[in-house]
Amino acid sequence: MAAYFHSVTLEKDKCMGCTNCIKRCPTEAIRVREGKAKIIDERCIDCGECIRVCHNHAKRALTDPLEIIKAYPYPVALPAPTLYSQFSHKFKVDQIIQGLLNLGFFRVWEVARGAEIATQVLVKYLENHALPKPVISAACPAVLRLIQVRYPELLEHVIPIESPMEISARLAKKELEEEGYPVEQVGVFFISPCAAKVTSVKNPLGVKKSQVDGVIAISDIYGPLLAQLASTASGSIQPRASGAGIGWAVIGGESRLLPFNQTLSVDGIANVVRVLDDIAMGKLKEVDFIEGLACMGGCVGGPLTIENSYLSKTRIQNLSKKYGMSYPEVAPEFACSEFFWTEKIEPCSVLVLDEDLALAMQKLETLDEIHKALPGLDCGSCGAPTCRALAEDIVRGLAVEIDCIFKLREKVTDLAERMVELSSKLPPSIGKPR
């Protein structure tokens, strides 16, 4: 993979060299070396799982500060539906929108509306295109990267349409341009629960360039926005999104809007990996559609959120009921095809041992032999997540066998026994006859 931007980064000073993160990384992209974690850029999918499990807060997401909106005369906020769930039910959606305007945004364009449009585009696409079953949602950028890195053979299952965030950004700019504002002076900023969204903006898949100009973490905007809500009256602005679009924030929110008989809604990156494993093995062919979200509970469980994800899920469900499940059809002036991907996603071969197939097979045999010789405890003390990962590192020349503490102990024990044996030896001149 060429130069690749990562939103997830490591603060070395805070890293204590524990192995929590290496155990939870779905692509085995982290090693601990010399007492510090090291992220392997080519493997990282920016799912943020390491941010979530790091007790020392050594992992963080690179997002934009709120002040960035001052760089544009007409900044537009794109609040993820998850933002609504971060605040007590006493604060209405219209108050949250007004609060964003009070913070300096010129306009608010709800991403929930983009989700409604994405739903219709998705249905239209599948009416005219045949994809292998099960078809897979492209909504979660971390899952999309996971497929690109770990399951490239499944890319043809992915529905190639833009995310609700990108659709919203495109339409927000178009709307302001049609109203006469210079589009180059319009800055569009996504309010994100998720580190992977930052990466999808900086290094997009499926499109050449993102329409989003910056990503602000929900956790960063929460405090200033809460202060605005305290003094903002309800009822001043009418939200335009329906409960259907808002519902995309939780697992199952996308699936329930689609006309499929068999759908699977899978949350949590480990569970998504298990389902993708099954698809790769030829299972689940009776399933029509799979919605996979990297975070538990869906976007409400994102690592850049503030509120308890279970409480957030309940709030989203309540908002969906309140605002109803009906939403307007895509305006006739919009051709659904304008939201299709324009770029093919190429597989990332970072898990291939060698580009030469014959050499790769040889290395795989060596890897299997090394793996069998290791204890199989997957203790992580070597700095790799599993014994097989250590075997792979050894084959790649990135580690040695005695990185395994048990193999090192075997070597030391053997050496000690030989030293004891040698210490009993005496020169023939003073010892016993041999």
Image (cartoon, rainbow, N blue to C red):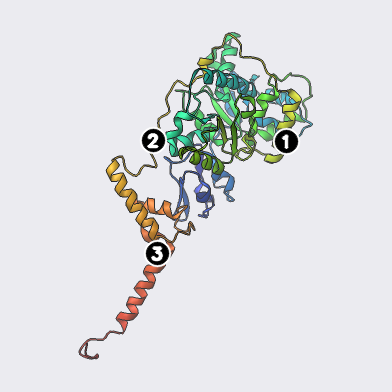
Q: Going from the N terminus, do you reach mark 2 or mark 3 first?
A: 2
Query: Are the residues tagged 1 and 2 within 8 Å (C-beta)?
Result: no
Q: Secondary structure at mark 1?
A: helix
Q: Residue 152 in the image: x percent, y percent?
A: 42, 35
Q: On the image, numbered disc 1 is attached to which residue?
A: 314
* Above or below, comparing residue 355 to residue 262 in the picture: below
Q: Which mark is residue 407?
A: 3
Indicate the secondary structure of the residue bearing disc 2.
loop
| Measured Cα–Cα span from mark 2 to mark 3 | 34 Å
Q: Which mark is on residue 1?
A: 2
Marks 2 and 3: CB-CB under 8 Å? no
Task: Estimate the x, y position of residue 67 in percent, counting from the top left.
Answer: 60, 29
Q: Looking at numbered disc 2 in the image, what kind of residue is underneath it? A: Met
The answer to whether residue 386 is seen in the rendering is yes
Q: Closest to the observer: 309 or 198?
A: 309
Compared across the picture, whether 144 is left or right of 193 comes to left
Q: Earlier in the sequence, mark 1 or mark 3?
A: 1
Q: Few, some or many C-alpha atoms within 10 Å of disc 1 (few <14, some 14-19, many ≥20)?
A: some
Q: Quadrant of the N terminus?
A: top left
Of circles 1 and 2, the one toward us is 1
Q: Where the C terminus falls, by quadrant?
A: bottom left
Amino acid carrying label 1: it is: Thr
Classify 241 as above or below 219.
above
In front of the other: 118 or 287: 287
Q: Does residue 348 appear left or right of residue 107 in this picture?
A: left
User: What residue is drawn where x is 59% and y is 37%?
Assistant: 266
Q: How dense is the environment of label 3, judged by Cα within 10 Å: few (below 14), some, or many (20 and up)?
A: some
- Depth check: give the residue in front, 21 or 326: 326
- Kindly report the distance in space between the C-alpha atoms of the residues bearing marks 1 and 2: 40 Å
Percent position of residue 34, x then y: 44, 55
